[in-house]
Image: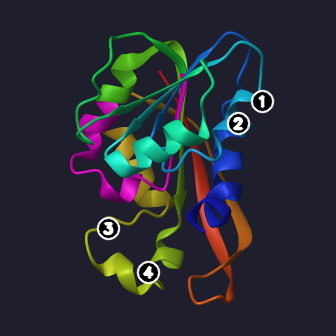
Amino acid sequence: MMHQSNFGMTKSTVEALKIKDNENILELGHGNGKHISFVLQQAENLAYYGLEIAETMKKEAEQSNESSATSFHLFDGSMVPLENDTFEKAFTVNTIYFWKNPTQLLEQMYRVLKSSGLFAIGFAQKEFMEMLPFTKYGFTLYGDNEFRELIAKSSFQLVDLSNHKEQITSKAGDKVERSYTVATLKK
């Protein structure tokens, strides 16, 4: 259900990267990985590297994606265990709410991107998230202003901030309109 309700956000976030042939792509928090085939269809000869904090999600992603173009690894949610200047593109969807030290994680992502690399972040708008009962516990919510303030503390340059609306099905089975943002950052 999470894959279905988040695919629109994921699609918009991936498309914001304008992925080209022969690029190395990093994703933070890939979940079950059912969207990765869409990522790999964006261009030829891509290498996908996924980082996840949940071992169960890592295993599900590995089972769903047996391509030699994919690689899945666990990380602690703070330190990115990768070498400097490795990826042309990176993205994450619906993870920013859980970043323990957002400025530090942004700097980690900056470090692993190559020069002029892009990092796209998809997140649901604060006003939408505040309507969900579970977001009172352990979530840091962002509107465009809070997000801009966060990025201003990082080394990244904000290239684009696009707002979207989509109809999704809630856990209760109701149709709701979700407002979300896709931010594109450049090294």
The label shown at residue 62 is none
Q: Which residue is mark 1?
A: 41
Q: Residues within 10 Å of mark 1 (few under 14, many from 20)?
A: few
**Visible in this render: residue 140?**
yes
Report the side of 22 relative to 66 (left or right): right
Instruction: Name the N-terminal-most of marks 2 and 3.
Output: 2
Query: Residue 75: which quarter of the image?
Result: top left
Q: Measure the alpha-carbon separation of dots 2 and 4.
A: 32 Å
* Residue 161 colored in magenta in the image: no
Provide the residue designation for mark 4. Answer: 130
Measuring from the top left, give residue 21's x and y in whole percent: 74, 13
Snapshot quadrant of residue 5 = bottom right
Foreground: 26 or 54?
54
Dot 2 corresponds to which residue? 37
Q: Residue at x 73, y 69 (%)?
A: 166
N-terminal of the pair, mark 1 or mark 3, is 1
Alpha-carbon distance for marks 1 and 3? Answer: 32 Å
The label on residue 139 is: 3
Disc 3 on helix, strand or loop? loop
Q: Determine the secondary structure under disc 4.
A: loop
Judged left or right of residue 46, residue 77 is left
Circle 2/circle 4 CB separation < 8 Å: no
Q: Residue at x 23, y 31 (%)?
A: 79
Asked if residue 111 is positioned above or below residue 57 in the image, the reply reads above
Q: Quadrant of residue 86?
A: top left
User: Given this view, does label 4 or label 1 mark the residue nearer the observer?
Assistant: 1
Q: Which secondary structure, mark 2?
A: helix
Q: Which residues are magenta?
A: 89-107
